[in-house]
Structure formats: structure tokens, C-alpha cells
Amino acid sequence: MPTDTPVLATLVVGDRTFRVCRATRDDVPGIVALLRDDVLGSGREGAPESRYLAAFEAVDADPAHTLVVVREQGAGADPPALLATLQLTLLPGLSRGGATRLQVEGVRVADAARGSGLGTALLEWVAAYGRERGAVLAQLTTDRARTEARRFYERLGWVASHDGMKLTL
């Protein structure tokens, strides 16, 4: 892993150690590969690389956003393979007494790391990240077709309390 990659956290899961880092421009192809690596993503993640790079620049420039990548420490490759990603956004608001929310988007864990405990450790870190920054609520959306992801989030205490709605623009 490059030494200049900002490490946000170290997660120890069993005998494995993972580094949670702020994503860099060089991580974009690996992030896109994770986004494409499922049935839904394979059909919707096909934009030219330049669009993903422009989106990365916009996200990275905004201090309310944190794009995260996770790699295993000491995994041998240089840099080690990207095993997970997600985007965090702090949303200040007037509702709930002026509460700040933590929006969690684009959560992906590579097949090679599923079932290892990495996803659980990462989502526990996400909750701590939000609390440390004054968020009183974390929220995420998951496609209804991702039944395993939904079961995973529910097992961790996430509650399907609202119906999300989208409008394609």
C-alpha cells in the first residue's frame, strides 16, 4: 500500500488486519471493478473512465464526503488488492432537532472477503465514524434485489424504517 495513502482505521478480524483508507485517484479503477462485480452493477456501471474520475474529483474535493477503500495489510501485492469500498456523506439538517445524518452509499465487499467478518467490522467502524463527527443517525439504501445484503444489514441492527424513492433524471 502506498505510504502516502491516508489510513483512517485499522480493523483486526481474526488473524487478518485490514487498512481503511481514504481513496485516491489511483483507486478509482478498483472501486469501479467492485461496483461492477454483481448482477445489478454489471448492468449499470459501464460509463467511460473519465466520468468516474471526474466524479472522484468532485467527491474528494468536498469535505462532507469520504470515499473509502479497504485492503488487507501484508497481503503481498503492491498495492494489496482492494477488498471493500463505500462512500460516507455527512448531511446536516433541520429535522430531528438539527441533527446530522451519515449517509452510507456504494457499499461493496469483494467476493474474496465475504464471510470473513470484514463487512461487519467495516460497518461497525462506519457507526463510530459517524458518532465521532456528531451524526445521530446513519442511513443507507440497498436495492431490494440484494436480499443477502439486506439480511446482513439487519443482522447488524440496521432497520428498514422508511421506504426510499428514486426519480431518474
Image: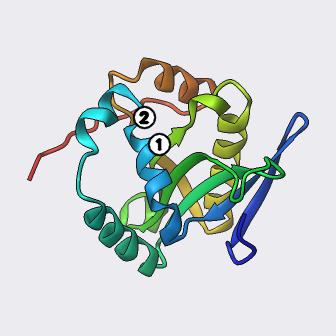
> Spatial distance from mark 1 to mark 2, Cα to Cα?
5 Å
Work out which quarter of the rendered image holds the N terminus and state it: bottom right
Count every numbered label the image shows and give the total. 2
- Identify the residue position indicated by label 1 in the image: 34
Residue 20, percent from left and from top:
69, 57
Where residue 95 sits, quadrant-wise, is bottom left
**Residue placed furthest toward the right:** 15
Q: Amino acid at mark 1?
A: Leu
At a point 68% along the width and 59% down the height, the residue shown is 79
At a point 23% along the width and 53% down the height, the residue shown is 47
Where residue 162 sits, quadrant-wise, is top left
Q: Nearer the viewer, residue 37 or 64?
A: 37
Q: Is residue 163 at all visible to an observer of this figure?
A: no
- Identify the residue position indicated by label 2 in the image: 37
Q: Nearer the viewer, residue 113 or 151?
A: 113
Q: Secondary structure at mark 2?
A: loop
